[in-house]
Image (cartoon, grey):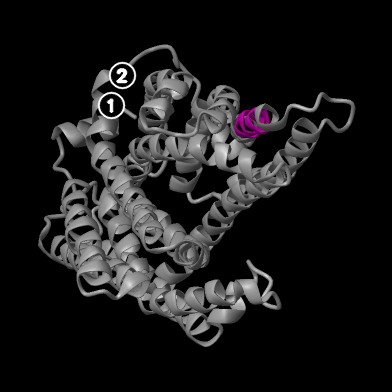
Amino acid sequence: MPWRRETGALTRLSVPIVLTNLGQIAIQTTDVVMIGWLGPAPLAASVLGVTLYFILFMFSVGIMMATAPMIAQDLGRVSYAVREPRRTVRQGFWAAALLGVPASLLFWQIDPILRLLGQDLALIVGAEAYMHAAMWGFVPALLFIGLRNFISALERPRAGMVVMTIGIAVNAAADYALIFGKFGLPELGLRGAGIATSLTNGFLFVALLGYILIDRRFRRYQILGRLWRPDWRRLREIVRIGLPIAVTLVFEVGLFAAAAFLMGLIGTAELAAHQIALQCAAVSFMVPMGLAQAATVRVGLAVGRRDPAGIRAAGFAALGLGTVFMSGAAVVMWTLPEQLAGLFLNSDDPANASVISLAGTFLAVAGAFQVVDGAQAIGAGALRGLKDTRWPMVFAGLGYWVFGFGGAVLLGFHYGMGGIGIWIGLAGGLAVAAVLMVARFAALQRSADWRRPKVGSPAAASEAGL
């Protein structure tokens, strides 16, 4: 019964989170499609800007992700706690603002940065126009992440899903109007795309904040109370827990960016096929990523109430659900690889035949690592629920870069296996990370002492004062 209850709770929590994550991908896809209508040069220029934006954004998201286990553990200790979750949300806002300052400085100086990297001057002009408009949405996007963590920790993530769904329409309308000059607005091209990005991120934050302030279940937390007051101890805890998560995310983003670079060294067809296979894998990955976020919350709640059985059930139920889904995704990739590739390119055009064939081969390997990719993500999420983030960072560096990137270079170039060798190397690195993540969670949930705090202890005194 506990396992059945936990599986149900994880499913109810993770489904809205997964759909919200897919909504974010839909927004990004809309941007790419509409900028692509301008032509290949504007699309390439936007990619230059988005690459820098994405790396800094993922690093900052890692810091913000620390708020989810902190809120969950506080709520697990005292289910009606108000003060402690509010402190964490408030300092999450502070963290978002502080992260936005250096990021904005870099975005504003994107011209000299791209010149230093030897990029085409014509593309730099377009990238600068895009980034000088898109940068204003950076902090609102982080604030939205903080609010999503808050409602997820309360196990009520549907509001984020609804807001994100509306955000898809807002982004599409803003892109269409500002890029192409529709509805009486000026035609701004790439600058219009950047403005649309900022407006969409602003909408997501304001809409979710408005819902939280109005809904009676959230209103009692008064998350904007004393917003101007710093809480340096809580802010330091966010950074302490979040910094290893941030580095882990950058490790992962950097690995696949480096893999794309390796593919480019082999050939254009390999690079295009790599991008198709990677996009398919990214869509399926949204499910274990959502389960990982749900596992963080469920494990954190169990830790707060000192429930070893709950910790174990939350972590392993999430792994079980992830394994079932990713096994199904693997079967699809194995049985329909060229059909999936055909969704991105016209399969009737003989010029695309080599790319589609390569993409099908890469998808077969992607299918092989679906289960381990999901396991490493969910294992890391469960460990975050225990506020254990440093060792997962070490495991990510070891798995992704020593075994993953090292194996890709060795197999792809030294042994002459080309693109298939690079994908096999990536699969091996993810497998190493998965084994280490899951083994550490299994060890911690067995060995840690989850007794309730004694009467009169600082923790008990803190609970009594909430």
Quadrant in which the N terminus is drawn: bottom left
Which residue has dot 2 on it?
Answer: 231
Separation of residues labelled 1 and 2 (CA atoms): 6 Å
Give yes or no for contact between labels 1 and 2 (Cβ–Cβ under 8 Å): yes
Q: Can the viewer see residue 429 in this picture?
A: yes
Q: Which mark is residue 285?
A: none
For residue 81, above or below residue 425 = above
Question: Is residue 222 in view from this perspective?
Answer: no
Q: Is residue 319 left or right of residue 17?
A: left
Secondary structure predominantly adopted by residues drawn in magenta? helix
- Classify the position of the C terminus by image quarter: top left
345 lies above or below 173: below
Q: Residues within 10 Å of mark 1 (few under 14, many from 20)?
A: some
Which amino acid lies under the numbered mark 1 shown in the image of this protein?
Answer: Arg
- At x 61%, y 80%, the residue is 339
What number of labels is visible? 2
User: Residue 412 in the image: x percent, y percent?
Assistant: 28, 69
Image coords of residue 25 (percent x, y) = 57, 52
Give the image quarter of residue 401: bottom left
Q: Which residue is mark 1?
A: 234
| Residue 287 point in image, percent of width and height | 48, 64
Q: Amino acid at mark 2?
A: Asp
Residue at left 60%, top 33%?
Answer: 201
Q: Nearer the viewer, residue 244 or 233?
A: 244
Task: Please provide the residue range marked out in magenta.
Answer: 193-203
Q: Residue at x 45, y 65 (%)?
A: 274
What secondary structure is found at the residue carrying circle 1?
helix
